Amino acid sequence: MSENKEEALFQAKVDAEQKIEPKDWMPDAYRKTLVRQISQHAHSEIVGMLPEGNWITRAPSLRRKTILLAKVQDEAGHGLYLYSAAETLGTGRDEMVDQLLSGKAKYSSIFNYPTLTWADIGAVGWLVDGAAIMNQVMLCRTSYGPYARAMVRICKEESFHQRQGYDILVTLCKGTPEQKAMAQDALDRWWWPSLMMFGPSDKDSPHSAQSMKWKIKRQSNDELRQTFIDRTVSQAEFLGLKIPDDKLKWNEETQHYDWGEIDWAEFFDVIKGNGPCNKERLTARQKAHADGAWVREAAMAHAEKKMKQKAA
Amino acid sequence: MSNEKDWPLWEIFIQSKRGLDHKHVGSLHAADAQMAVENARDVYTRRNEGNSIWAVLAEHIHASKPEDQEAFFDPADDKVYRHPTFYPMPEGVKYI
């Protein structure tokens, strides 16, 4: 069959809302886009464990500590679901890990910001996981079967993450003036980076149109960002916290909030590697991988020895 | 890094409740079968999703090919007589 005919059949399947499965014919660019997107998403889950892991030993109570441990363990699991989905496209796990460790692959910029106080753990759950959920719910309906199935699994677990974050902030906001100030400070620092998580504005997002045509994504960056803002404002009001945006105002006509301007220079600067924690995050992952090398080798040697004994 | 030997890939199947089928949930890397089952427990059953786990080396799974779709599955299309609804039952006949 000719390439054009294959491509037409592929697009017809996508248009008919049939999932694409690993062995199906697919355009090279579709495969490449997916491997890049899914592995970046997996890397984000793994690197995302670092800012939160920072607070496991310092969580204010045993209850908070067990919850945070469970959440960080979930992030590891989410990384694995996603690596597993990406591998069905023919790229090996080792290759993806190498790309992360060499700095070639990207991960979500948000994890290059530091978690300075306990309130940051609340803000990360509420805002960062909240923003991630918007994107992930959309991806449950993505056109590539294994990716969609991984996202369904992730979404089932993710709303616990957002709620535990909000719960931390509810507690702080009902506490002393100092605790409430700590919550406000966390919101001040995490609000704009959370909005950046949705990616560049539609007009500056060159691949968006193709991804929409392939139904990899189904809503634009700006649409998702607006929905997130519309949903989050009342949650901040309940906490008695002020969102750090003077232009934020309900617009009766559009039935959406109007809001200010994202500092895109900061966004691209952090992506380029100049965020507050880029180096620290990458170094931590490289160290973990290097320190674990002997364990991986020993486990393999042990497995091979057992196989030989069994065969003998 | 790259001269390191990769752990093999295992496909994981979970039975969510006694009496139900084992269902494919995803894959993971592990050095041996025991580690595959233990890791599957941690990766795929953190919220009571499972009652039993199968781990199968991915290379041992043989799959049909999408290009054989028609030759494989179309012959079933014109065999409606394999379905009970093909046979109209006379009025008044019961328990069949």
Image (spheres, coloured by chain):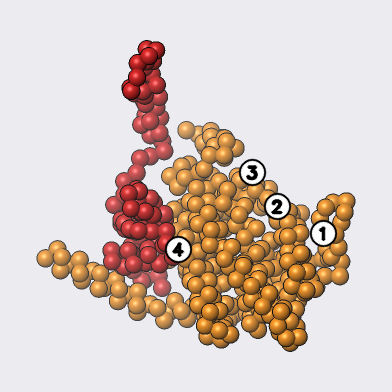
Chain colours: A orange, B red
Chain under callout 4: B
Q: Residue at x 34, y 77 (%)?
A: A295
**Residue marked by disc 1:** A257
Q: Which residue is mark 4?
A: B47
- Marks 1 and 2, how far apart at CA: 17 Å
Q: Are marks 2 and 3 on the same chain?
A: yes
Picture quadrant where residue A251 is located = bottom right
Disc 4 + disc 3, Cβ < 8 Å: no
Marks 2/3 in contact by CB < 8 Å: the verdict is: no
- Callouts 3 and 1 close, C-beta under 8 Å: no
Q: Quadrant of residue A94?
A: bottom left
Q: Nearer the viewer, residue A72 or B26?
A: A72
Q: Chain of mark 2?
A: A
Closest to the observer, A74 or A286: A74
- Mark 4 residue crowding within 10 angstroms, few (<14) / some (14–19) / many (20+): few
Q: Position of residue A47 (x, y in %)?
A: 55, 72
Left or right for A37, reference B28? right
Residue at the top extreme of this rendering:
B90
Judging from the image, mark 3 belongs to the subunit labelled: A
Q: Dot 1 surroundings within 10 Å: few (below 14), some, or many (20 or more)?
A: some
* Circle 4: element type: loop
Distance from the alpha carbon under mark 4 to that under mark 1: 37 Å
In this view, the mark in front (2 or 3)? 2
Task: Identify the amino acid type marked 2.
Answer: Ser
Mark 4–mark 3 distance (CA, rounded to whole Å): 36 Å
Q: Any mark on residue A213, and which?
A: 3
Which residue is found at the position 20% from the left and 66% from the top?
A307
Q: CA distance from mark 2 to mark 3?
A: 12 Å
- Is the residue marked by circle 3 packed among few (<14), some (14-19), or many (20+) residues within 10 Å? few
Spot occupied by residue A306 in the image (x, y as percentages of width and height): 20, 69
